[in-house]
Image (cartoon, rainbow, N blue to C red):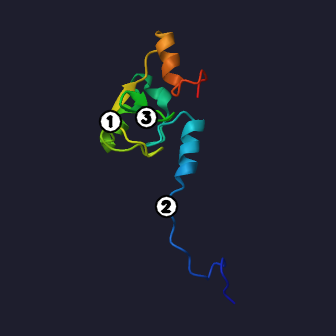
Amino acid sequence: TCHLGSPCAPQRPSAMPDFDVIRAEAANQAACPICLDSLSTSPSEVVALTWQGRRVEAALYHRACVQRLRLVGAVSPVSRQRVDDVLPMPPLSRRRDWVRFVDWNGDGAIS
């Protein structure tokens, strides 16, 4: 007989991707949440999304991915916060600026 879950039972259409899993994977691997490629391959092209001059989330992106999806003037694909600009990641040679950038919410921790 055919029962739910058996190979002969009709399969449900695949659901939307689990964006929580995608976000977690991107964070674990320091990857862009849009393309899932490593951010370390082009650190000078890493940006954060901002609203009124403040970062909206911890996620970091490739500048090209943000431009391709036209995220400026839209919402973040990770946090769904409004976005009006990007903030480029400072080079490590500017240590204080880099630490402030990585401490995105100002809690004194690299988050």
- Secondary structure at numbered mark 3: strand
Q: How far apart are the two marked residues, 2 and 1, measured between alpha carbons? A: 27 Å
Q: How far apart are the two marked residues, 3 and 1, measured between alpha carbons? A: 15 Å
- From the image, state whether disc 3 or disc 1 is nearer to you: 1
Q: Amino acid at mark 3?
A: Tyr
Residue ID for mark 1: 84
> Which residue: 36% across, 38% down?
83
Point out residue 46 in the picture as x, y percentages from the top left corner: 42, 28
> Which residue: 49% across, 61% down?
16
Point out residue 88 in the picture as x, y percentages from the top left corner: 39, 24
Q: Quadrant of residue 71?
A: top left
Residue ID for mark 3: 61
Residue ID for mark 2: 16
> Which residue: 47% across, 33% down?
60
Circles 3 and 2 in contact, beta carbons < 8 Å: no
Residue 103's place in the image compared with 22, above or below, is above
- Sort mark 2 into few (<14), some (14-19) or many (20+) by Cα contacts within 10 Å: few
Point out residue 59 in the picture as x, y percentages from the top left corner: 49, 35
Q: In the rendered view of the protein, which quadrant contains the N terminus? A: bottom right
- Sort mark 3 into few (<14), some (14-19) or many (20+) by Cα contacts within 10 Å: many
- From the image, state whether disc 2 or disc 1 is nearer to you: 1
Task: Say whether residue 30 is left or right of residue 44.
Answer: right
Q: Amino acid at mark 1?
A: Asp
Q: In the rendered view of the protein, which quadrant contains the C terminus? A: top right
Residue 62's place in the image compared with 102, above or below, is below
Residue placed most toward the observer, 13 or 103 = 103
Residue placed most toward the observer, 72 or 23 = 72
